[in-house]
Image: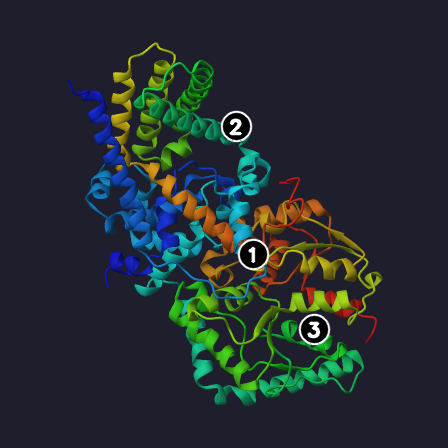
Amino acid sequence: MPDIPLIILLFSLAVALVGVGIWTFQLLSRNSVCDPSPGKGSDKLGALYAFTLGMLPWKKESARLHWLVYLRGISFHVGIFAGILALVLSIFNVTNLNALSLVLSVLMWIGVISGAASIVSRAADPKLRGISHTDDYLSPALITLFMLTGALHVMDLLGTVYFYISTSVLCLYLPWSKVRHCVYFFFSRGKIGAMMGHRGLLMIPGGNSRKPTI
Amino acid sequence: MPTVEILDKQLTRETVAALGGCVRCGLCAESCHYYVAQPQLQNMPVYRGEAVRRLYRETTGLANRLFRKSAKTASNQGRSLDTLTDMAFGTCTLCRRCTVNCPVGVDTASLMRTARSIATATGKAPEILVQLADSAISRGENIELYRDLLLEQLKDLETETRKKINDPTFSIPVGKKGADMLFVGLSGEHSIVPPAILFHYAKANWTFSLFEASNYGSFLGDTERSKKIAQRIIDEARELGVKEVVIGECGHAYTVLRWEAPRWFKEALPFRVRSLIEVLAEWVQNGRLILNPDANPEPVTYHDSCNLGRNGGLLEEPRIVLRAAVRDLREMYPNREESYCCGGGSGMVAVSEWEERRMLAGMPKARQIKATGAKIVVASCDNCRIQLTELNQRYNLGIKVTGLADLVVNAVVNK
């Protein structure tokens, strides 16, 4: 007898992949700005910096001022990756990984808390509410549900079917969601990093400002 | 041409990524000097970006059209092009502070530049900026009409300066073929005389440009106008066969010719482009100019112009010069690539009806300056100088605003 939840899941994953493909096409179908100016620094080092040292919380004022939001964002995304790994292990029926299961469930639980906190704080802050779309609530809610069912599944407290259903719903919604930033993030950050590297910025030992006075 | 089509023509890979990458986390808010001065929803960079995103969604597929209907966004409030124009020209100085603070790397400044392009293409850009850009283009097309007037003005400046520095050999060369550098200044004595004195002291083989460095086309987000304005200087430099073009103390003019023009023309320029600041830093370091810091004993702070610093990469060069030229250099915090915009950039100082919001947006910078206790603020950008001078009056800062070259002239030992 065919495994219906698995078939639905695989179909949903295909839909999500088509979404990712469309976003990528939308991006790549446009011309990129080439920069023939002689550089003051290195584009490659700039891009590398953007994805490494530039990601450190003390390198950005926005992260320094909102370190809790920064940590929440990091733990949310780590939880997502743990959920994806749990899903892959489940699809391939890999079991008896007690230590890994424990780690994955802990990471997903932290992700769940972070996701729920982000929804609540968005709803509670008038300014954030003012800039928010429906999707700004729906996307983190579906992802949080995905991590929640994943965590319960890994802990053997919930059947595979629920994990697959929540994943399928998320995947079917994905092409319309702000999850598209997963594609644009790499391009935007890489490009800005390369530009700043090219212009001789960001490579200053010790960074820049230290103590805000206003 | 409909707005949506104009937008579609403007879209590059970079702008598509900026449009699609925002997750509306709101972390950009405090990076904007408008928001710091007035913490309101409308002053959040993400709010401005959403206005452009709404236009973009109209250009994409069915899914986005459906989604747009369910969106309860700030962008809904900014539907009219008039509002978008006001946002792009009157509430954003394209300083890119939000860009460097965005966790995703969303370049909201590039979206605002796109909005400026749309406003300019639809005839909604501030008239004064259009006039200034067109007047620069006209000057380039009719340089013979202006040449004699310029030479006359320079002669007057030469006479006065000879007396001032007590050196009858001082001169400002124009159209000198075979010169090493073509210096492109701004209008006004303050932008011409101090560099000319320093070139004279350093025995540089230089010549003065017939054109001003300003490029108001870039403020309009109008690449065609920008190219025409830049082309005048490129042609002049080619004709004279100079090795490099040196831009005076002007933020946007440096960024335009150094970084933007090669992108517009899709090729590297056939000469080196440097700022006067870089030239001075080199001369201070190699001993061609020897400075005595005791000549400038008062406490000095340096304002990082957004175009020179965060957008142009000149963060340490001015400090190299200042450490040699002044006795007491104090930093504002944050500084360098995290420096706050003074609020006068990207054409703001030219539009008189925005004076009040410009003064308000300059509040964070005024507080920074006050906190240093400095008596002299150095700004190597003319728009910043104008804005800081007005901030000084508005917020009673008790400072003197000056250019870098002025302090160096005071401090030169090997005259």
> Horizontal and vertical percent for residue B165?
78, 78
Q: Which residue is mark 3?
A: B194
The image shows a total of numbered marks equal to 3
Q: Secondary structure at mark 2?
A: helix
Mark number, residue A71:
none
> Horizontal and vertical percent for residue A93?
32, 19
The chain under label 1 reads A
A30 relative position to B349: left or right: left
The kind of residue tagged 2 is Leu
Alpha carbons under labels 2 and 3: distance apart: 50 Å
Which quadrant: the C terminus of chain B?
Answer: bottom right
B412 relative position to B259: left or right: right
Q: Residue at x 49, y 64 (%)?
A: B350
| Proximity of marks 2 and 1: CB atoms separated by less than 8 Å | no
Whichever of callouts 2 and 1 sits on the residue coming sooner in the sequence is 1
Mark 1 vs mark 3: give the one in front: 1
Q: Which residue is mark 2?
A: A68
> Horizontal and vertical percent for residue A187?
41, 48
Mark number, residue A42:
1
Mark 2 vs mark 1: give the one in front: 1
Alpha carbons under labels 1 and 3: distance apart: 34 Å
Of the pair A111 and A62, the residue shown nearer to us: A111
A135 relative position to B307: left or right: left
The chain under label 3 reads B
The chain under label 2 reads A
Alpha carbons under labels 2 and 1: distance apart: 33 Å
Q: Is residue B53 above or below residue A107?
A: below
| Proximity of marks 2 and 3: CB atoms separated by less than 8 Å | no
Of the pair B161 and B110, the residue shown nearer to us: B110
- Let me know if marks 2 and 3 both belong to one chain: no
- Let me know if marks 1 and 3 both belong to one chain: no
The kind of residue tagged 3 is Pro
